[in-house]
Amino acid sequence: MTKSIFEVKIIGHIRTDFPGKFGVPRQSGIVETLEGRIEFEKEYAQPEAFRGLEGFSHLWIIWQFSEAVREKWSATVRPPRLGGNTRVGVFATRSPFRPNAIGLSSVRIKKIDLNTPKGPVIYVSGADLMDGTPILDIKPYLAYADSHPDAVDGFAGQIGCTKLKVVFPEALLKQIPGEKREALLGVLEENPVPHYQKDAERIYGFGFAGREVRFRIADDELTVIEVE
């Protein structure tokens, strides 16, 4: 018999440069230079709740796929990594369309500021979350227990990951804030477009740091054509 075990509370939200889902890295840690900050709801913004966290380098973030909450779920999904045509079990993927729309990300702690006007704020890098994503919990990453160098990646590890060559005209790159350029280049190198989309004439775009970045992809080269 299916039961609801307890009420899940939102303890905070993360602020990032991505207003939408498109463009967000597919996994945490892939683009280390992407930065974000976790801000906490008043009830949980108590400095003593973070005592000792400064001794850790990385953090697990447990969060809600807030844009993918559904009443129903499917036992199989079509991972973009497999071309969008092959179905596999939802529990063999990190798809957002799950019985419970919960995500898990590992990020690096850049700084912990306990005394901001909003209360404690944790600054992180390597996050794969869109701006405003609800945070359900955070836990320290433990290298001795959480790291598995001999782990097997299943079908996800069988598909090669080739970085794209990014052509970003200087005049357009200057429209991106200087401290955010390296992170954006990292996002583009990882190819934000689903692997099964191969239309060299199609113009793609996503929001980043208050700008709209538009580009084309031909073969293994991504060319930025507009920044608004």
Image (cartoon, rainbow, N blue to C red):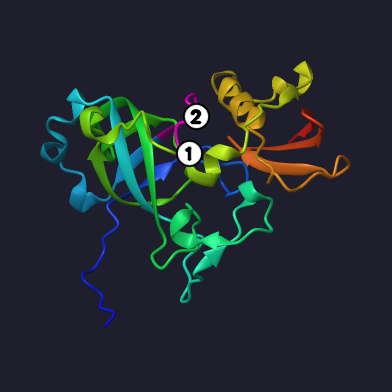
Q: Which residue was labeled with disc 1?
A: 16
Measuring from the top left, give residue 92's x and y in whole percent.
Answer: 46, 55
Disc 2: CA contacts within 10 A as few (<14), some (14-19) or many (>=20): many
Measuring from the top left, give residue 193's x and y in whole percent.
Answer: 69, 43
On whether residue 155 falls in the magenta region, the answer is no
Main SS class of the magenta portion in the image = loop
Q: Which of marks 1 and 2 is in front?
A: 2
- Residue at x-position 49% and y-position 40%: 27
Q: N-terminal of the two: label 1 or label 2?
A: 1
The kind of secondary structure element at disc 2 is loop
Whether residue 178 sits left or right of residue 147 in the image: it is: right
Badge 1 amino acid: Thr
- Residue at x-position 89% and y-position 42%: 201
Q: Quadrant of the C terminus?
A: top right
- Contact between marks 1 and 2 (CB within 8 A): the answer is yes
On whether residue 30 falls in the magenta region, the answer is yes
In the rendered structure, which segment of residues is drawn in magenta? 28-36
Measuring from the top left, give residue 102's x and y in whole percent.
Answer: 38, 57
Badge 2 amino acid: Leu
Q: Which residue was labeled with disc 2?
A: 34
Disc 1: CA contacts within 10 A as few (<14), some (14-19) or many (>=20): many
